[in-house]
Amino acid sequence: MNQKRKQIYIITLAIPALIALIIWIYWGNSALTVNKIIIKSSKIPQSFSGYRIAQISDLHNTKFGSNNNRLLNKLKETNPDIIVITGDFVDSHHTNINISLDFAKQAVLIAPTYYVAGNHEARILGYNKLEKEIESAGIVVLKNEKIQLKKAKEYITLIGIDDPSFRQNYLISDSKMLIKSILNNLITKDDTFTAVLSHRPELFDAYVESGADLVFTGHAHGGQFRLPFIGGILAPGQGLFPKYDAGLYSKNNTNMIVSRGLGNSTFPFRINNIPEIVVVELQFK
């Protein structure tokens, strides 16, 4: 086979492969999956056994269908008791708060919805407006505070933590001490089962040392690019081959959920990392 024929042969094989790769990447960024996780604990009140919490994280202004209808329909199908949004609802690089607000107005029609901000909200100038609009839509914004979710005269405690980057003179090295201090002031012996909304999974040790029972986080984007048997490649706050990139992590009596999230930011696409809704079902044991 002469050189010219070799080149034609290689191009003939390469073009379909490239097209297939592009289609696969596009599908992998526009598809939606639901990841169900069961959390069992003797601290969960019996009336909350079977309670379903749907988590939305790192939307980053992404749209799944017109007006996010595909995302909202998939969320509704999970039949949640509550919805929690764990930060980066907008993207500071190409901010469009209307996408987030339109989603918020529809989410509250599905189930009571609770929200904490992420590091991208801390970067935008219009965050105060966004927060007020989110509250006007009926979503409860939790800022270093807790509420009780009640059912049949029993309750669990829901805690929301502001992202550390909202603090002036923010330093990454101080984050663990800061979050631990906030949680130590919020979690008391009177609380039964505590569920914490906090954007950052890299602060897992702070959640464990504070005695939180269940923590919902995002931020890692599943490591953006995922390899079989290895997991995520790169995550903000953790760098290469992040320790906490997706799924369930347990230590002592603390369980932490890391959502792969829905949108993208610095990198415009994902590889082998389908956007997800996480659904946690609580079970008394």
Image (spheres, rainbow, N blue to C red):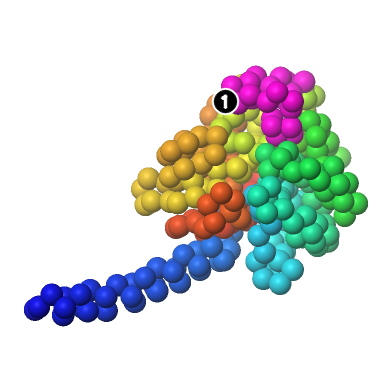
Q: Main secondary structure of the magenta part?
A: helix
Snapshot quadrant of residue 193: top right
User: In the picture, which quadrant includes the C terminus?
Assistant: top right
219 relative position to 138: left or right: left
Residue drawn at point x = 37 percent, y = 45 percent: 230
Identify the residue shown where x is 50% and y is 64%. Answer: 28
Q: Residues within 10 Å of mark 1 (few under 14, many from 20)?
A: some
The residue that label 1 is drawn on is 205
Query: For this view, does 32 lie left or right of residue 72?
Result: left
Is 131 placed above or below 239 here?
below
Residue positioned 69% across, 30% down in the render: 164
Read off the magenta span.
162-185
User: Where residue 217 sits: x, y (%)?
Assistant: 63, 41
- Residue 176 percent across, percent down from the top left: 62, 23
Up the image or down, 98 lies above or below 116; here it is: below
Q: Residue at x 81, y 38 (%)?
A: 142
Relative to the observer, which residue lies in front, 100 or 190?
A: 100
Quarter assignment of residue 174: top right
Number of numbered callouts drawn? 1
**132 magenta-colored:** no
Q: Amino acid at mark 1?
A: Asp
Residue 131 horizontal/vertical position (percent):
84, 45
* Secondary structure at numbered mark 1: helix
Quarter of the picture holding the N terminus: bottom left
Q: Is residue 107 at least partly visible in the picture?
A: no
Task: Report the front residue among 43 and 211.
Answer: 211
Where residue 77 appears, as percent x and y from the top left, is 69, 65
Q: Closest to the observer: 48 or 98? A: 98
On the question of residue 181 being in view, the answer is: yes
Whether residue 178 appears in magenta in the rendering, the answer is yes
